């Protein structure tokens, strides 16, 4: 049994065994991961998906900080019952500017992938402050402190620069105007929203609840209210990227 | 390392050993159980079958499609289409029929109520409560007080276009419209208290003098709430003569807050999110909750 005696080389030399393991794992990795970078069906481009506005990005940071993903998924699976309840199944492209993505894996609460626009801003605020005030059986904790916490956004431009390195197409113009844009999205009468909309299509302005500048709740509500709203599914062709 | 050339048989069990020895102790080389081994081989065969039948191997020109040509997007589309086909006899009729025709046909109305109840649970209950009983700030749909009208057509219009939702055909299309904040419209704290006294006296008759508040009410509030304070469905102005629970609460603190800071509740426009059959069914369901006109 000459094959077995050759195998003894691996069993007797840990360094050779290590190199052997690396080679085997690398082959597996190349076969499984490599194609994801060139297969058209896995890198589907979809019209409408845009980077987060500075305010939405700040809200997303709070979503991550508070660990919302531990109870809420953002991934509507391509199953009948999910599509019936939550709407069109999630597309990979819809989370392409998420670093890290917030797909989650546990649904103590409902999926949030298409929560944007489903309820009013007031509902979101009231529900965050005391979920039981609108959903009597809810087990969600209260996040009332978000309404009184001023939004810390001095580093928002740095956040955007890091995301740009990761592949989010923020332009220098977007980064330069980030702080103005953040405040503009909280001023429903401000003419600056028009400028904001040229940089971020379909952006929705929200009334701030903070007397002295934006609050963390403002940012989180802006983020929640845009989730799943960027793609127009009446125009979406699910076969366009097949090959 | 198994020494296959010089097999050593353990005397006590008759089983071959691995050839490893530690201070006179040897390791038995018991073969894997047959059933496990055959299951393992069967899995390998299954995997080959799977590769052939289902999408599996990524190649430079695209992944293999498999002989069944299965795709998750087609699969869900088929499931949804099947569901639609099952519902089609009723949903098709609901799409064709007017709201009045649906509510006149007992069988169709029964289906619409059931269909509407399920859509209500998913989309509307978060604000209006699971039975349409409402919440503070979110109207009770099971009563007979309506902000924007309780006829079938009025309910359908409100669901489709929303309230202050930016939909040009909706009620109060701009988000900023609604009841003004009177503390910023020239009423001072004392005047707000006086008008609150008057408004309270409408539902809780009192002997106190509320004429000062009445005067302020006549000057400022009748434009929307009407001279008889019975509200105006075209403006979404609530009836202040109603003794049932008020939208934001009828206690003193809430009434003062409402007058001072204004109110502009929003309801999303569902026309773009829900299909016609769902909106019609929701209308029939909401209309049937108790207050339909």
Image (tube, coloured by chain):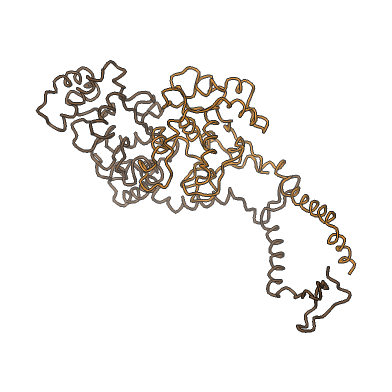
Chain colours: A orange, B brown
Residue shown at 52%/52% (left/top)?
B79
In this figure, what is the number of numbered marks? Answer: 0
Q: Quadrant of the N terminus of chain A?
A: bottom right
Residue shown at 43%/35% (left/top)?
A145
Question: Can you name the residue that lies furthest to the left here?
Answer: B207
Looking at the picture, does residue A125 appear above or below residue B53?
above
Q: Quadrant of the C terminus of chain A?
A: top right
What is the quadrant of residue A42 in the picture? Answer: top right
Looking at the picture, does residue B31 appear above or below residue A98?
below
Residue B31 percent location from the top left of the image: 75, 75
B287 displayed left or right of A91? left
Q: Nearer the viewer, residue A188 or A43?
A: A188
Question: Can you name the residue that lies furthest to the front here?
Answer: B23
Looking at the picture, does residue B122 appear above or below residue B185?
below
Q: Nearer the viewer, residue B264 or B209?
A: B209
Residue A130 percent location from the top left of the image: 38, 40
Residue A82 percent location from the top left of the image: 50, 48
Question: Can you name the residue that lies furthest to the top here?
Answer: B186
Residue B276 percent location from the top left of the image: 40, 40
């Amino acid at each position: 049994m000459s094959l077995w005696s050759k195998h003894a080389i691996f069993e007797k030399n840990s360094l050779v065994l290590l190199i052997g393991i690396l080679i085997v794992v690398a082959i597996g990795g190349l076969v499984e991961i490599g194609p994801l970078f060139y297969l058209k069906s896995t890198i589907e481009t979809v019209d409408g998906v845009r980077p987060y506005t500075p305010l939405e990005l700040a809200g997303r940071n709070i979503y991550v900080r508070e660990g919302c993903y531990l109870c809420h998924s953002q991934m509507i699976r391509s199953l009948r019952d999910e599509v019936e309840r939550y709407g069109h199944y999630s597309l990979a492209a819809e989370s392409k500017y998420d670093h890290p993505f917030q797909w989650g894996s546990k649904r103590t609460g409902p999926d949030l992938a298409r929560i944007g626009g489903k309820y009013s801003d007031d509902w979101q605020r009231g529900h965050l402050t005391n979920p039981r005030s609108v959903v009597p059986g809810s087990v969600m904790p209260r996040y009332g402190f978000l309404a009184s916490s001023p939004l810390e956004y001095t580093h928002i431009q740095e956040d955007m620069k890091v995301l740009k390195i990761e592949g989010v197409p923020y332009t220098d113009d977007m980064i330069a105007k980030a702080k103005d844009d953040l405040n503009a999205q909280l001023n429903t009468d401000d003419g600056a929203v028009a400028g904001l909309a040229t940089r971020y299509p379909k952006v929705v302005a929200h009334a701030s609840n903070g007397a002295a500048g934006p609050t963390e709740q403002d940012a989180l509500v802006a983020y929640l209210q845009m989730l799943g709203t960027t793609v127009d599914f009446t125009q979406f062709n699910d076969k366009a990227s097949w090959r | 390392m198994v020494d296959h050339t010089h097999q050593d048989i353990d005397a006590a069990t008759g089983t071959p050993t691995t050839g490893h020895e530690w201070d006179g102790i040897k390791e038995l080389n018991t073969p894997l159980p047959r059933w496990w081994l055959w299951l393992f081989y069967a899995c390998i065969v299954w995997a080959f079958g799977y590769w052939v039948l289902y999408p599996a191997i990524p190649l430079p020109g695209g992944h293999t499609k498999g002989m069944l040509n299965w795709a998750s997007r087609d699969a869900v589309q088929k499931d949804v289409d099947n569901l639609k086909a099952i519902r089609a006899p009723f949903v098709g009729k609901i799409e064709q029929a007017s709201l009045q025709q649906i509510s006149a046909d007992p069988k169709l109305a029964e289906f619409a109520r059931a269909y509407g109840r399920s859509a209500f649970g998913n989309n509307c209950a978060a604000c209006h409560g699971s039975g349409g009983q409402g919440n503070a700030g979110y109207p009770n749909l099971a009563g007979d007080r309506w902000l924007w009208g309780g006829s079938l057509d009025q309910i359908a219009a409100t669901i489709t276009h929303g309230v202050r939702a930016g939909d040009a055909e909706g009620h109060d299309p701009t988000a900023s419209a609604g009841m003004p904040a009177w503390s910023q419209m020239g009423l001072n704290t004392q005047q707000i208290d006086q008008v609150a006294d008057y408004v309270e006296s409408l539902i809780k008759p009192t002997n106190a003098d509320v004429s000062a508040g009445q005067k302020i009410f006549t000057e400022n509030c009748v434009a929307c709430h009407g001279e008889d304070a019975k509200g105006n469905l075209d403006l979404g102005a609530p009836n202040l003569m109603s003794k049932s629970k008020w939208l934001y609460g009828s206690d003193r603190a809430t009434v003062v807050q409402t007058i001072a800071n204004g109110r502009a509740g929003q309801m999303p426009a569902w026309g773009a999110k829900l299909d016609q059959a769902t909106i019609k069914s929701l209308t029939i369901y909401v209309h049937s909750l108790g207050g339909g006109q």
